[in-house]
Amino acid sequence: MNNALEVDGLDWRAGGFFQLRDLRLRVPRGSIYGFLGPNGSGKTTTIRMFMGMMKPDRGRIRVLDMDVPRDMPRILARVGYVPERPHVYPALTVGEQMRYHASFFRKWDAGWAQEMMRRLELEPDRRISRMSKGETGKLLILLALSQRPDMLVLDEPTDGLDPVVRREVLTAVLDYVGETSATVFISSHLVHELERICDWVGVLDRGRLVAELPMNQFKSGIKRIKVSGAPRIPVDPPFTILSRQQANGAGTETWIVRGWQDPMRQYFDGVGLDLRDVVDLDLEEGFVELLRSSRPGTPRRS
Amino acid sequence: MYQPMLFLHWKQIRVVLIPFVIAAFGLPLLSVQGLGTLGGAVALEPLQALQAAQGWLAAYPLLAAAIGITLALSAWNWDHQLNHVYALSLPISRREYAMAKMGAGAVLALVPVGAFWVGALVASAAVHLPAGLHAYPNGLALRFLLAVMVSYATMFALAAGTIRTTLIVLSAVLLYFTVGGAAQSYLGLFFPFFQHTNVVGDTLTFLGRLGPFAVFTGSWMLIDV
């Protein structure tokens, strides 16, 4: 199988307010998969489901060709996990926490751990409760990487870290991936961060997956175009219109479109429309437009 | 895996364990104080000696229960604080994790129990008993060990769940005894375990009938006939 993570038909409901609905994910093996979504969209809940910490109401989850929750201990032996909030024991020192963690992982690489500790400038005798947020973040990455996982699950690993630490953490992850071809599943709402490192992206909003595609397609496929003489309902466009707005000038509209390719310019000649302008959107703009267009009640005509 | 878990629990409990170790060592010595100066000749009659030793009866099971409960709560304390996220991310089954954690606490319980045993041996050796009375330091230490383990295991199981679950279970037990006792007293309804129509008496009856809990209600005499 070519996917490190497969999620099918995942449903979960908490009271009447929040739910995951029929979630389907495919994370290709060896990819760096960015899991994007606004705060409260269900990213952490989804991660906790496939880490076996929460039980879905319905659905099937496979991680590294093993079933969740049946094969959970075997899965966790091969997955490095960095949760949203630090989960290590605050009264231990760095060295004690490392020894404790190492005792559970057969593939623990003590040499690598020492090297990482030196590189990330962590002191073995320093008590975790006295460490800064950045230092704790580095320790979590060190623990996850030193167990030599086949898959890394990082839940907002750089949230709240300063740019220097953020870079150190991401560099450590990328170095590891470069060395081992491990799969990385990284969730974030920091779009620019994922843009630099991910080759796949999934976008979650209000418990629904609204897009899942290679990063280059996501980046290049969302455009802002200006169209003159736009009809109320365009005839069979080869792209998806995410949003339409009146622009200045009679009959001119600004469209945000998805799935754009350059040969599609011919479509406008064919239906008698005037394509005035095609502008690249950066990932963040594309992300925002995608969310706006996917939410119920958003005007969307295509 | 087991050794680091033992270290983890030790690191959590070591400061709290010190007063328990002192109390466990000192309690048998205190309980024979009424028999006269330690090591000195005793002029008490056997009945007087027994009455003097009985004054400390309640302290033994209370201390054992306190040690067991403290050990159990400390075993889960850090995991509760971290919402169990770290524990659940480790590659072992929940059963294995709980068993290893429980085993670590049980080993640590031997520290105050050992202190108690030494204290009981010292107390037994130090007093001159009237004819017809004997000291039972080993038997009392074994009872103390059992009581610590029973309270530890019970509270460990309760605390393994969420705080909410623990509160629900404890509240249900308390409700049963208060509402049940009242219903029996005023309405004449029959409820199992109610004899004394007061919470303490009924709880003791309840414990006495539940097998292992009977260890708290039996004889806790260091000095006996």
Image (cartoon, grey):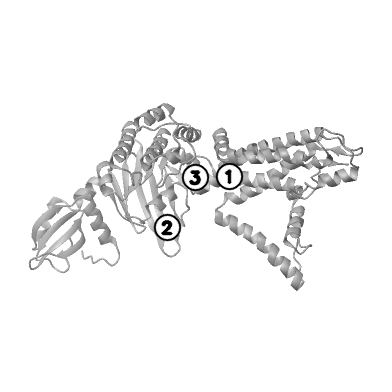
Q: Nearer the viewer, residue B38 or B170?
A: B38
C-alpha gap between disc 2 and disc 1: 36 Å
Decide: marks 2, 1 in contact (CB < 8 A)?
Answer: no
Q: Which residue is mark 2?
A: A11
Q: Is residue B166 left or right of residue B214?
A: left
State the mark number for residue B169: none
State the mark number for residue B88: 3
Residue B100 x, y percent position in the rendering: 59, 39
Decide: marks 2, 3 in contact (CB < 8 A)?
Answer: no
C-alpha gap between disc 2 and disc 3: 21 Å
The mark lying in front, picked from 2 and 3, is 3
Q: Of the residues shown, which amino acid type is indicated by label 2?
A: Asp
Residue A183 x, y percent position in the rendering: 35, 39
Q: Are marks 2 and 3 on the same chain?
A: no
Residue B77 x, y percent position in the rendering: 55, 46
Q: Residues within 10 Å of mark 3 (few under 14, many from 20)?
A: many
Q: Secondary structure at mark 1?
A: helix
Q: Of the residues shown, which amino acid type is indicated by label 1?
A: Ser
Q: Secondary structure at mark 2?
A: strand
Say if residue A31 shows up in the picture: yes
- The vertical placement of B2 against A84, above or below, is above
**What is the chain identity of the residue bearing mark 2?**
A
Residue A55 x, y percent position in the rendering: 48, 53
Q: Of the residues shown, which amino acid type is indicated by label 3?
A: Leu
Q: Which residue is mark 1?
A: B74
Say if residue A71 shows up in the picture: no
Q: Nearer the viewer, residue A4 or B76?
A: B76
Q: Residue at x 47, y 49 (%)?
A: A53
C-alpha gap between disc 1 and disc 3: 18 Å
Q: Residues within 10 Å of mark 1 (few under 14, many from 20)?
A: some
**What is the chain identity of the residue bearing mark 3?**
B
